[in-house]
Amino acid sequence: MNRLVRETSPYLRQHAGNPVDWYPWGDEALTRARDEDRPILLSIGYAACHWCHVMERESFEDPLTAHVMNEQFVSIKVDREERPDVDSVYMDAVVALTGRGGWPMTVFLTPAGEPFFGG
């Protein structure tokens, strides 16, 4: 189990058993990224999103993918229905970077939280 087991969002709790060391959006994750100078892998989705569930099965439940994520990033999972403010900021960034956006959305952030790539 990871930190999402303590969350109230059904979407976040669904990811509590993933081998990814997920953090919810908040100071704990952002401080760790800054302190360890690690980039952030931000994953945003929602419970009714079919492709969000597919991505969980194909990527976040895969031990090798989880290992890379755990070694290289501070991984943060956001429920866009619970945090539309966070979703809006990073959706705008992804659209500016790529010309389009959708869910599931993955955004790579500097340790300071600034987006540098996404899709």
Image: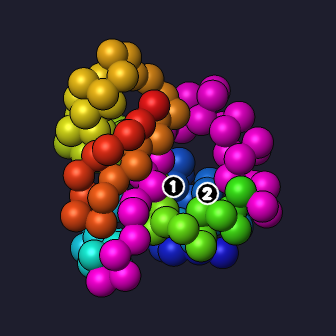
Position of residue 53 in the picture relative to residue 114 (left or right): right
Residue type of the residue flagged with mark 1: Leu
* In the rendered image, the vertical position of residue 68 relative to residue 44, given as above or below: below
Q: Quadrant of the C terminus?
A: top left
Task: Please tell me in which quadrant of the rendered image residue 53 appears.
Answer: top right
User: Depth check: 42 or 80 in front?
Assistant: 42
Residue 55 seen in the figure: yes
> Which range is magenta?
35-64
User: Depth check: 8 or 71 in front?
Assistant: 71
Q: Which residue is mark 2?
A: 15
Tell me if mark 1 has few (under 14), some (14-19) or many (20+) residues whose alpha carbon lies within 10 angstroms of its own: many
Q: Position of residue 66 (x, y in %)?
A: 68, 62
Give the residue at x 59% y 70%.
70
Q: Position of residue 56 (x, y in %)?
A: 68, 45
Q: Which residue is mark 1?
A: 12
What element does badge 1 sit on?
helix
Q: Are marks 2 and 1 in contact (CB under 8 Å)?
A: yes
Tell me if mark 2 has few (under 14), some (14-19) or many (20+) residues whose alpha carbon lies within 10 angstroms of its own: many
Residue 76 seen in the figure: no
Q: Answer whether residue 55 is magenta in the image.
A: yes
What element does badge 2 sit on?
loop
Give the residue at x 59% y 73%.
71
Residue type of the residue flagged with mark 2: His
Q: Quadrant of the N terminus?
A: bottom right
Task: Please tell me in which quadrant of the rendered image residue 5 appears.
Answer: bottom right
Give the residue at x 51% y 33%.
104
Q: CA distance from mark 2 to mark 1?
A: 5 Å
Position of residue 95 in the picture relative to residue 67 (left or right): left
In the rendered image, the residue lying farthest to the top is 99
Give the residue at x 63% y 27%.
50
Q: Answer whether residue 31 is magenta in the image.
A: no
* Res. 35 mark: none
